Amino acid sequence: MILGVDMGGTKTELIVYDGEKFDFLEKFPSNKENLKSLPERVDKLVKSYGIEALGIGVAAWIRKEKIIKAPNLNVDYLNFNFSVPYIMENDANCFAYGEYREHEDEEVKNLIGITIGTGIGGGLIINGEIYRGNGLAGEIAHTTVLSGEKEERCSCGRTGHLETHFSGWSIEKRLGRDVETLMREDEELIYGIEGFEILARSIANLSLILDPDLVVFGGGVGRNLNVDRVKGAVKKYLLPEFEPKILISEEEYVGAKGAALLAQKRFRL
């Protein structure tokens, strides 16, 4: 049995995987108390389910399995004293790998995974493997999309980044309302802000560089976007020769599932 953990800026999700099916265990806020007590929570699950390994997706920049930076998560409270072997990976990479495994029967080999929640994450699958570059590849959130003195400061400390225009926190700041409520009650307002077009242009630019088979959106905001609106916006900026399939993820807990699958692969379980 493998435990999969998806630790985002707002919430953390846990699933268990027996090699054939996934079962959801629990979800809780990614706050100080919960992050500090994660090893205790994991130890209880190890005993209850016979967990052999742990896969953890973290909303952080990770190089050589060490956290370099975490703009939307206070990693000072993280404690990795687990009683079983574990693998730690960027949460968007876990999402992208989970989606790749979900679609691999469709001959998908090259995939861009975009998570939009508290912040924005990007994971790249090239020829069936996560592409990390020197460790931090895929950080589309922190590409500069506009510049100027009036540009919003990003969670990473810089200005003019994609995340300042279409992440959960930036949408709430621009529209003055809770993003989940907006998605449920006034979705059209979200498509009307400039940030949506900026997001579409950024995805198109990345698709022109990588020519993927599939672009898939997930996360608390991303999973609630209208796929036709997204397709229409992205394709405005694509050359006609580029035809990636664009999907909104229909699976729940994909980040946690991807983390578990990566642990299975690493530890050959």
Image (cartoon, helix red, strand yellow):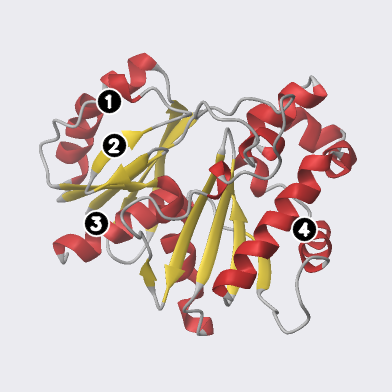
Above or below residue 1? Residue 108 is: below
> Dots 4 and 1: beta carbons under 8 Å?
no
Q: Report the residue marked by disc 2.
A: 67
Nearer mark to the viewer, of 4 and 2 = 2
Name the residue type under label 2.
Answer: Ile
State the residue at coordinates (23%, 61%): 264
Of circles 3 and 2, the one toward us is: 2
Element at label 2? strand
Are the residues tagged 2 and 1 within 8 Å (C-beta)? yes
Q: Where in the figure is residue 165, as x and y percent of width and height? A: 71, 37
Q: Closer to the camera: disc 3 or disc 1?
A: 1
Between marks 4 and 1, how big is the CA–CA gap?
35 Å
Nearer to the camera, 24 or 195 = 195
**Residue bearing mark 3:** 263
Residue matched to label 1: 78
Distance between the alpha carbons at the discs numbered 3 and 1: 19 Å
Q: Amino acid at mark 3?
A: Ala
Tell me the SS state at disc 1. loop
- Check disc 4 and report the residue beneath it: 230
Q: Residue 211 shows which numbered tag?
A: none
Separation (CA) of disc 2 from disc 1: 10 Å
